[in-house]
Image (cartoon, rainbow, N blue to C red):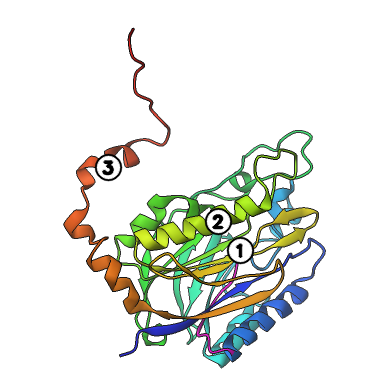
Amino acid sequence: MSRVITVAAAQMGPTQRADSRAHTMARLLRLLEDAAARGATLVVFPELAFTTFFPRWLLDGPDLDRYFERAMPNPAVQPLFDRARELGVGFYIGYAELTPAGERYNSAILVQPDGAILGHYRKVHLPGSVEPREGARFQQLEKRYFAYGDTGFPAFRAGAGWAGAIMGMMICNDRRWPEAWRVLGLQGVELVCVGYNSAAYDPNGGSTEDAALRTFHSQLVAQANAYMNATWAIAVAKAGDEDGSGLIGGSCIVDPNGRIVAEARTLGDEVLVAPCDLDLCRQGKEKMFDFAAHRQPAQYAPITERAGVVEPAPLVA
């Protein structure tokens, strides 16, 4: 049986705070249909794809609640689910989740071509702060608006529509932490979907990182970790000038050798398509990164014993 699936990275340009849900939904549908017309059966959308990146503002009450989805799907997003099922295309999409118990998460789901939800993930590595920075024009308040994800990093076995792929999910900052990739790698992951909204620069000042360097880092982590875990990776941005705050692009599809096979060239709505042969993962998994043969977990205790750095004692003169 062929284990080649055609995937699409559906990069989005900026979604402004004033944009209506109908306007954003129309863009998502266009991207989905473009990907399907080019043969894709999996479309990966960005983090928080239905809204602007709202954690850049201090919000509460109804002003905050309007950005959250209380169920998935729900009437506002049902057209995307319906059209995907009609086209025989599945997708990954990120959104802000409000549970019946009132818990809030930065979440993503994988929806198979038949419309069934294969997996649900909640972002673990939340950047930013709980309290706003005084005098700052833009904030990064993910720690204020979202709880830390409680799902861990599960892998999911897809159905025949995706050639039985072993699939995993991350969201934005998760991709910068090798532990997340390795947990998926230890489950035999073959394809990792990542959506992100990453700042192109510090909008409140500072010049140590520019958009080019941040885009390089974004692609670097996808390439390095795809290689070290012998997996395909699809990393997809929401990009451009969003209400005066820049977001990087750099969406890419990366093979299990860490090579970029498709890459975005703009900061707008753009679809990248590539065939992914899942059997290409076998070379790495059976040789260089044969975990059962080569890993030494007894030596890795500090990774799970502590979060911060403990430096060695200074030399005594």
Q: Quadrant for residue 190, please give it.
A: bottom left
**Which residue sits at x=36%, y=66%?**
155
Mark 3 secondary-structure assignment: loop
- Report the span colored magenta: 38-48
| CA–CA distance in space, label 2 to label 3 | 26 Å
Q: Which secondary structure class fits the magenta region best? A: loop
Q: Quadrant of residue 196?
A: bottom right
In the rendered view, does 186 fall on the left or right side of 258?
left
Disc 2: which residue: 218
What residue is pinned by disc 3? 300
Mark 3 or mark 2, which is nearer the start of the sequence? 2
Q: Are marks 3 and 1 in contact (CB under 8 Å)?
A: no
Asked if the residues shown at circle 2 and circle 1 are in contact, with their CB atoms under 8 angstroms apart, the answer is yes
Of callouts 2 and 1, the N-terminal one: 2
As helix, strand or loop, the secondary structure at mark 1 comes to loop
Which image quarter holds the C terminus?
A: top left
Which residue was labeled with disc 1? 250
Q: Is residue 15 left or right of residue 120?
A: right
From the top left corner, tell me how far across and down residue 93 is, in percent: 56, 70
Above or below: residue 7 compared with residue 230:
below
**In the rendered structure, which amino acid carries the disc numbered 1?**
Gly
Residue 87, image x and y in percent? 56, 91
Res 238 visible:
yes
* Residue 260, position as x, y percentages in the image: 50, 68
Q: Residue at x 37, y 87 (%)?
A: 160
Residue 256 falls left or right of residue 294 = right
Kindly indicate the quadrant of the structure image that contains residue 259. Answer: bottom left
Q: Eyeballing the image, is 106 above or below 5? A: above
